[in-house]
Image (spheres, grey):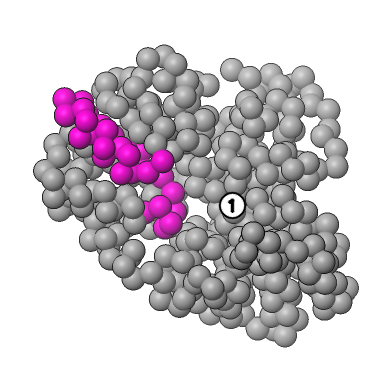
Amino acid sequence: MKYIDEFRDGGIARQIGAHIATEADPARNYSFMEFCGGHTHAISRYGVMELLPANVHMVHGPGCPVCVLPIGRIDQAISLALAQDAMVCTYGDTMRVPASESQSLIRAKARGGDIRMVYSAADALALARQNPRREVVFFAIGFETTTPPTALTIQLAHREGLTNFSVLCCHVLTPSAITHILESPEVREFGTVPIDGFVGPAHVSIVIGSGPYEHFAEEYRKPVVIAGLEPLDVMQAILMLVRQVNEGRAHVENQFKRAVTSEGNLKAQAPVSEVFELRPSFEWRGLGEVPYSALKIREAYADFDAERRFSLHYRPVADNKACECGAILRGVKKPTDCRIFGTVCTPESPVGSCMVSSEGACAAHYSYGRFRDIHVTSATAIEEALP
């Protein structure tokens, strides 16, 4: 397939791997975090790690929007469907994310909640038009990539004067999460951050551009290479990061020039700025409260804010104590470090959020067999995981 197969050529991948092996200093270790869940998926699916030298390590970051969605927000959506009799619409993966008391949106649907999978915010808006006597709520999640369509949908609902449509906004922001990781005590060791550089996200960067990452290069001296989602994109980005580290440089470089510019997509940014504003703080699963890391609906569009319309109050809920998703999302642990990975917790019956979406680190590792051995799970771990 033109423009796809060229970026999946095994021979070229091995050549890039050989360059990385030649240029990587054997006297040091390199640790690079790929923030984007799409990159995590590509690394696992195409066996990128098998082509890298042993001293080049990839650290999985919180780049899966389904994975970082906290339990308390899912509980709010379930409450809207079961207690408020609202029609709740959201993306397919969101339906399966574990919530409180062994619940999820799909299980709440089985209990009688009117919860529907949609492909876009526009689908939810169409349902609101078709059901004028029902409250229709779009449960909006995602990074900067999915935020513009939500903003445009709210603008359209405003112009049409729809009174039965609202949005439970859980859109989060990439740069704030990276800053939190760099500042978080969980990933600091003796005053240093054990990450040598970042593979910058692809789709997010198409929208926001490369400019927002300059901060990390300048203040934290961490190189960033924005990469496309194909395996050769990722490998070239790793080679570019190795070269920056070797040369003592910390710059933002753009491997994904075929889609990403410095300023990003200004037309997509405009409706986001008009409809949304920053939240002072927002909880991320695995990261806790992250300052200025999410969006809320502005006062001018308050009629479409489900939190205000239904007087929702957020209540944080702790993750399953047997699950290591929090540490995995921070890059502190790998999926195989979790005692229930691949045994109690699988894509068919996820205990943690990282096993739900194909972009989640645990689901990617499990689905493509990128683990050598699933250790025997103790009876204690099983008891802790099960309700």
Above or below, 52 against 168 in this view is below
- Queried whether the magenta region covers residue 386, the answer comes back as no
Residue 251, position in %: x, y? 58, 80
24 and 269: which one is in front?
269
- Residue carrying label 1: 37
What residue sits 15% from the left and 53% below the top?
A: 300
Specify whether residue 340 is in view. yes
Above or below, 347 against 189 in this view is above
Residue 194, position in %: x, y? 69, 63
Residue 114, position in %: x, y? 34, 22
Label 1 sits on what residue type? Gly
Q: Secondary structure at mark 1?
A: helix
* 329 left or right, relative to 103: right
Above or below, 103 against 153 in this view is above
* 354 left or right, relative to 149: right
Q: Which segment did they paint magenta? A: 119-147
Quadrant of residue 234 in the image? bottom right
Crowding near the residue tagged with mark 1, few <14, some 14–19, many ≥20 C-alpha atoms within 10 Å: many
What residue sits 62% from the left and 37% below the top?
A: 355
253 and 158: which one is in front?
158
* 136 left or right, relative to 60: left
- Queried whether the magenta region covers residue 127, the answer comes back as yes
